[in-house]
Image (tube, rainbow, N blue to C red):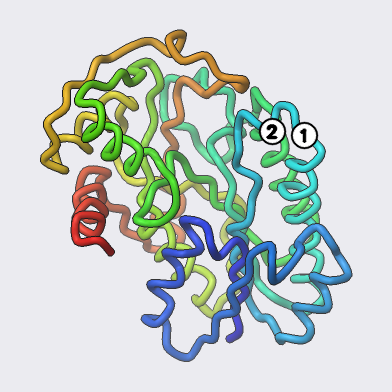
């Protein structure tokens, strides 16, 4: 099985690279913007034909949440048109597709974990374009499913865990918001889930089209930062503050906890508790991996 991984230089794509050797019998084709322009439908189709693609994991996305507010055209090209092009190519070559989406498709006003069939209501350009990308993929007729995730971090790229560790050492005192609650997602855990699904050998959309995946539990950004500092052995104090202390161009959802029962039930996927995964990631970072 030849599997295309788009956005392969990002956090999730990089973690898929590290795990792919565990999936014998499958060949992986890794692309980022330099290798494949997903906004060009003809190029995407020909690439899938030439490489005899049987599966696609679309990790490519415009994720600059604040910049998207003034760069809507580009966000829409990547998050909507790019997703649609990949889904249409998947139909033409008979490939399965896992498309990565986000908790930002919700408005953040819930007070219980959100389920896949809850109404979406994005509050910014990034969330709106990701919601439209979901719809384009699901309307394509491809054997595709959407996996929404939240608060992604990993040993690769720039993310909250690395930022807190860096500034914790440099500054010794940090202010972190306490009024936004969600669940971190260790990209390595999500990568394994995506690989298990795409290599399952069955019609992946047979049970459902939209799934949620994050680690287990629910915390605030303040709680998350506190755990990062503690587990990293860094001497740093952290002060809880309200979101109004950090005004941003785009609003953030105040509540981003998602229900993961469906993906666990349909695919038999075990999801680690957030702190266990954070320990694993910090261990890798401390070893310089």
Does residue 170 sit above or below 263 in this rendering?
Answer: above
Query: In percent of the image, x 61 and y 22: which residue is there?
Result: 250
Q: In which quarter of the image is residue 177?
A: top left
Nearest to the observer: residue 165 or residue 56: 165
Q: Quadrant of residue 170?
A: top left
Does residue 55 sit above or below 251 in this rendering?
Answer: below
Residue 1 x/y as whole percent: 58, 86
Nearest to the observer: residue 286 or residue 211: 286
Left or right placement of residue 130 versus residue 115 in this view? right
Query: In percent of the image, x 37 and y 63: which residue is there?
Result: 268
Query: In percent of the image, x 25 and y 55: which residue is there?
Result: 285
| Label 1, label 2: how far apart the Cα atoms are | 5 Å
Residue 77 x/y as whole percent: 79, 47
Kindly give the residue lying farthest to the front in the view shown: 170
Residue beneath label 2, please?
Answer: 68
Left or right placement of residue 287 versus residue 155 in this view? left
Left or right placement of residue 282 versus residue 244 in this view? left
Residue 173 x/y as whole percent: 22, 21
Nearest to the observer: residue 191 or residue 208: 191
Residue 50 x/y as whole percent: 77, 86
Q: In which quarter of the image is the C terminus?
A: bottom left
Secondary structure type for disc 2: helix
Whether pointer 1 and pointer 2 mark residues with C-beta atoms closer than 8 Å, the reply is yes
Residue beneath label 1, please?
Answer: 72
Does residue 180 sit above or below 16 in this rendering?
Answer: above
Other residues around mark 2 within 10 Å, as few (<14) / some (14–19) / many (≥20): many
């Amino acid at each position: 099985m030849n599997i295309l991984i788009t956005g392969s230089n990002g956090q999730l794509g990089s973690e898929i690279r590290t795990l792919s050797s565990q999936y014998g019998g499958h060949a992986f084709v890794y692309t980022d913007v330099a290798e494949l322009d997903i906004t060009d439908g003809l190029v995407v189709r020909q690439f899938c034909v030439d490489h005899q693609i049987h599966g696609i994991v679309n990790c490519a996305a415009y994720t600059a949440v604040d910049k998207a507010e003034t760069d809507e055209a580009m966000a829409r090209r990547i998050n909507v048109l790019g997703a649609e092009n990949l889904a249409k190519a998947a139909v033409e070559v008979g490939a399965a597709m896992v498309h990565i989406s986000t908790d930002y498709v919700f408005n953040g006003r819930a007070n219980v974990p959100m389920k896949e069939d809850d109404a979406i209501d994005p509050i910014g350009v990034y969330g709106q374009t990701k919601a439209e990308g979901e719809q384009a993929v699901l309307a394509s007729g491809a054997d595709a499913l959407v996996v929404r995730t939240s608060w992604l971090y990993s040993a690769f790229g720039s993310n909250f865990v690395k930022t807190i560790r860096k500034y914790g050492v440099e500054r010794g005192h940090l202010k972190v918001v306490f009024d936004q609650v969600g669940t971190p997602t260790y990209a390595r855990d999500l990568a394994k889930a995506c690989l298990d699904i795409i290599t399952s050998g069955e019609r992946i959309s047979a049970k459902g089209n939209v799934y949620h995946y994050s680690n287990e539990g629910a915390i605030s950004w303040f709680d998350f930062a506190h755990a990062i500092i503690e587990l990293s052995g860094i001497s740093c104090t952290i002060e809880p503050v309200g979101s109004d202390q950090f005004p941003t161009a785009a609003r953030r959802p105040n509540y981003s906890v998602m229900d993961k029962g469906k993906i666990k039930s349909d695919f038999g996927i075990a999801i680690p508790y957030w702190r266990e995964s954070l320990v694993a990631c910090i261990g890798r970072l401390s070893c310089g991996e």
